[in-house]
Image (cartoon, rainbow, N blue to C red):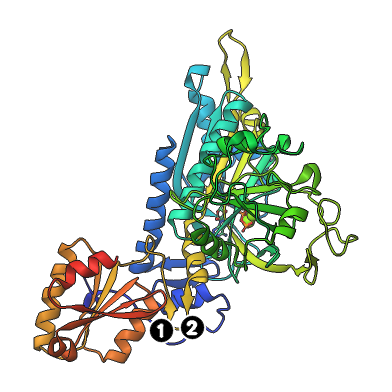
Amino acid sequence: MTRLSAYLLPTEKQAPADAEAISHKLMVRAGLIRQLGAGLWTYLPAGWKIHRKVEEIIRQEMDAIGGQELLMPLLNPAEPWRRTGRIEIDEIFKLNDRKGTEMVLAMTHEEIVTTHVAQVVRSYRDLPQILYQIQVKERDEPRPRAGVLRTREFRMKDAYSFDRDEAGLDESYAKHIVAYDRIFDRSGLEWYRVESDVGMMGGTAAHEYMAPCAAGEDEVALAPGYAANVEVASGDPQPVEQQAPLPQPVEEHTPGCTTVEDVSRRLGVPAGAVLKAYPVIASGRGLVLVLVRGDHRVNEVKLRNALRTDVRPATPDEFATKIGPAGFIGPVGANAPIVLDDAVGDGGYVTGANRGDFHLRGVEPGRDFPFERADVRAVEPGDTVGGHPIRIEKAIEVGNIFKLGTRYATALGASYLDESGRQHPVVMGCYGIGPARIVAAAVEQFHDEAGISWPRALAPFDAELVVIARGETEERVFADRLYEELRESGLDVLYDDRDAGPGEKFADAELLGAPVRVTVGRRTLAGGELEVQVRRGRERLSLPLEGAADAVAELW
Ligand code: ATP
Ligand code: MG
Ligand code: MG
Ligand code: MG
């Protein structure tokens, strides 16, 4: 039951004076968040609702891969942090309790979860385990900024996997990739998964999930227009036997695969599906080839949105020169990273590259593929590839997954006995997501001059009902009834029943960004039609009053 007249949604005409990021400006202006101090934010009711929606998506996908939710304290004894050496990290908030004992406010929970696993896991039968929580983290960030994108206190979904060996870890890691891909897809974000440095966490492999947006602090490089087309079976599927064997390098990223069909099977691309290749430069680290299956047109649109670049099918010449006959880049050599992008159907982005399923670091333009400035090793603005300028785009890290190995288990004594009674350290992975960053990245990616245009899965309300009426008029009676009907048809509706003018109501509705706005006014009743606005694209349509509630529910 949400009537705006009784709901705390303090909208503002002006953004905070110090705000630069669009998500900072719009989330404050829309009444979603309020600042308390440097890097400290309160979520007001509508903002918290959005955050919780993201958390729920995360929870569902973590549960789907067998994750078990638990909750660990934010306030930690310093001891385990000393044992791993992480006590030295500058970002850690430390304090003493009244007895003078040193305490830590957790920035993540590897130390704590591993301490418990060390206590309770004894035998190989106790493994594997995936444990996760959605819990507050504290970090003394050197530069809190951009609203909720970088705060000193934030909630994180942090998951930890515990396995018997590296092979087990590979499986747990692969499960998390599935879960993460689905989480970011379901959130409605544009995103990339890129291989990343293992950094201070140590470990053997890591990926970052990046959401392109202006307020981001990382960079993604794209080569607009540099598109090539691998029509493995362009609408005219070739029998498998006729497909050329893959060039040698494919062994690197798809072990055991010798034909396109093998690769298709391994990557879950149906044999005979149309594979299109779109080379782009990702993360300044090299060439990424995106293969898309399924319907061309849909994929091109999705891909264009996802890559924020112009994509087009390659000409036959480009195809011949840039892409090998079997759909892999000829001149690239063993380091050709390949992203396989399932942009259709279940929406899962299956992303692969030439080592495991990963993007590859260390691919060098010029060495590994034709590049205008062969002397250039890093992608810089002004560089070109295939005659096309490379564009550097900003992105924000929304998630990060690590193969940690045994570092924490060794430091904290987490081990198990195998079948023959031999002791081994537990092999760990850790997996983080910042829901606040998903929320803010959605605002960065989906807004216009009037305000926010939420992806449906994140929207604070399914629809906003605006009544243009002062006092107890016929319109208000009608709108009250429509409100009930909309709710009965399963929609979560914000009802702007305030005694305010249409200008103010429309402005607030567009600022808040519910996917659908329904207006009831004098003209509505006179003309027998409801005015509906679809927020994204601001398209207007009319619906007959009769059956309006159901029609709106269907729009959604
Ligand atoms: P960054 O590189 O942006 O500082 P990080 O690598 O330090 O992030 P992780 O330790 O990998 O972050 O934490 C996992 C996730 O938590 C990040 O991917 C991000 O979504 C989120 N996160 C990290 N720091 C913050 C912060 N200060 N405010 C909000 N969310 C954060
Ligand atoms: Mg950080
Ligand atoms: Mg990072
Ligand atoms: Mg990180």
Which residue is nearer to you in this view: 311 or 349? 311
Question: What residue is rendered at 45% in x and 49% in y?
Answer: 135
Q: Which mark is residue 385?
A: none
Amino acid on which disc 1 is placed = Glu
Residue 530 location in percent, x, y? 20, 81
- Residue 285 versus residue 300: which sits nearer the camera? 300
Q: Is residue 132 above or below residue 544?
A: above
Task: Give the left or right position of residue 180, taking residue 512 as reference.
Answer: right
Q: Is residue 282 in view?
A: no
Q: Is residue 446 left or right of residue 366?
A: left
Residue 12 bears which disc, if any?
A: 1
Distance from mark 2 CB to nearest ligand 1 atom below 8 Å: no
| Quadrant location of the C terminus in the rendered image | bottom left
Distance CA(mark 2)–CA(mark 1): 7 Å
Q: Considering depth in this image, is 156 or 116 the residue closer to the camera? A: 156
- Packing grade of label 2 (10 A; few <14, some 14-19, many >=20) is some
Q: Amino acid at mark 2?
A: Ala
Q: Which residue is mark 2?
A: 15
Residue 476 shows up from this direction: yes
Ligand 3 rendered quadrant: bottom right
Q: On the image, which quarter does residue 429 sit in? A: top right
- Frontmost residue, 313 versus 553: 313
The residue positioned 50% from the left and 58% from the top of the image is: 154
Assess whether mark 1 and mark 2 are in contact (beta carbons under 8 angstroms): yes
Residue name at image x 60 percent, y 59 percent: 140
> Considering the numbered disc 1 on the image, is that residue within a helix, a strand or a loop?
loop
The quarter in which the N terminus is drawn is bottom left
